[in-house]
Image (cartoon, helix red, strand yellow):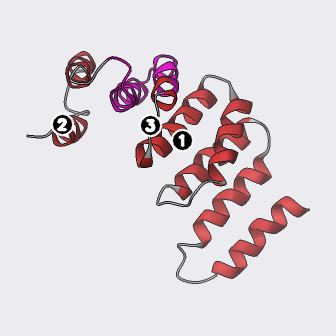
Amino acid sequence: MDWETRVAELWAQIDDLPEDEFHDRMRQLAAEFPPGHAISSFELASAQDSTGHPDEAVPLYRSALAAGLVGTRRRRATIQLASSLRNLGAVAEAITLLEAELTRESSDLDDAVRAVLALAYASAGRDREGLALVLEALAAHLPRYQRSMANYARALVSE
């Protein structure tokens, strides 16, 4: 079985395994790559983050990004790093990362970027901007009222 399949299977078991066993198995999978490899660092960071250890996840996300993580994992790492930073009180850095991410190529994670940025704005006391982002993201998925919701979102930040 290939590495990606084994990682996916481990992630599918996260809620059924004791935390230490989940971490041990993720470390074993990560050890199949050279130390500091972008993908293994990302998966280790995600494992720490998903089990409530954002302080341990942040340096691993940074390592993964510095090692040249690409594609969907790069975008996920940026979103997850920003979320962890927000949780640790580094709200300004989280906002900077996510605002930059909004200018990058669009993907199926655009709404996730907006959702985490909305949370970061709320943490920074910028609730209207956060609500505007959420409405903007939601508008694209509504069967009706897309134009109205998009206009309301713009009005929230222009008032």
Task: Determine crowd level at label 2: few under 14, some 14-19, many 20+ residues with C-alpha closer than 10 A.
Answer: few
Q: Residue at x 59, y 35 (%)?
A: 82
Q: Quarter holding the N terminus?
A: top left
> Which residue is the site of mark 3?
69
Task: Determine crowd level at label 1: few under 14, some 14-19, many 20+ residues with C-alpha closer than 10 A.
Answer: many
Task: Name the spot of residue 71 as percent of width and height, x first.
Answer: 43, 48
Task: Name the spot of residue 52 as percent of width and height, x first.
Answer: 43, 24
Which of the marked residues, 2 or 1, is nearer the chain's N terminus? 2
Question: 69 or 118: which is nearer to us?
Answer: 69
> Which residue is the site of mark 1?
79
| Residue 122 in the figure: left or right of residue 32 | right
Question: 125 or 5: which is nearer to us?
Answer: 5
> Which dot, 3 or 1, sits closer to the camera?
3
Amino acid at pointer 1: Ile
Amino acid at pointer 3: Leu
Amino acid at pointer 2: Trp
Task: Name the spot of residue 153 as percent of width and height, x first.
Answer: 75, 66
* Residue located farthest toward the right when viewing the structure as drawn: 159
Q: Quarter holding the C terminus?
A: bottom right
Find out whether residue 43 is within the magenta segment. yes
Which of the marked residues, 3 or 1, is nearer the chain's N terminus? 3
Is residue 114 positioned above or below 142 on the image?
above
Find out whether residue 102 is within the magenta segment. no
Q: What are the residue bounds of the magenta stretch?
A: 35-62
Q: Residue at x 20, y 34 (%)?
A: 10
> Which dot, 2 or 1, sits closer to the camera?
2
Q: CA distance from mark 3 to mark 2?
A: 17 Å
Q: Which mark is residue 3?
A: 2
Which of the marked residues, 3 or 2, is nearer the chain's N terminus? 2
Q: CA distance from mark 3 to mark 1?
A: 13 Å
Q: Main secondary structure of the magenta part?
A: helix
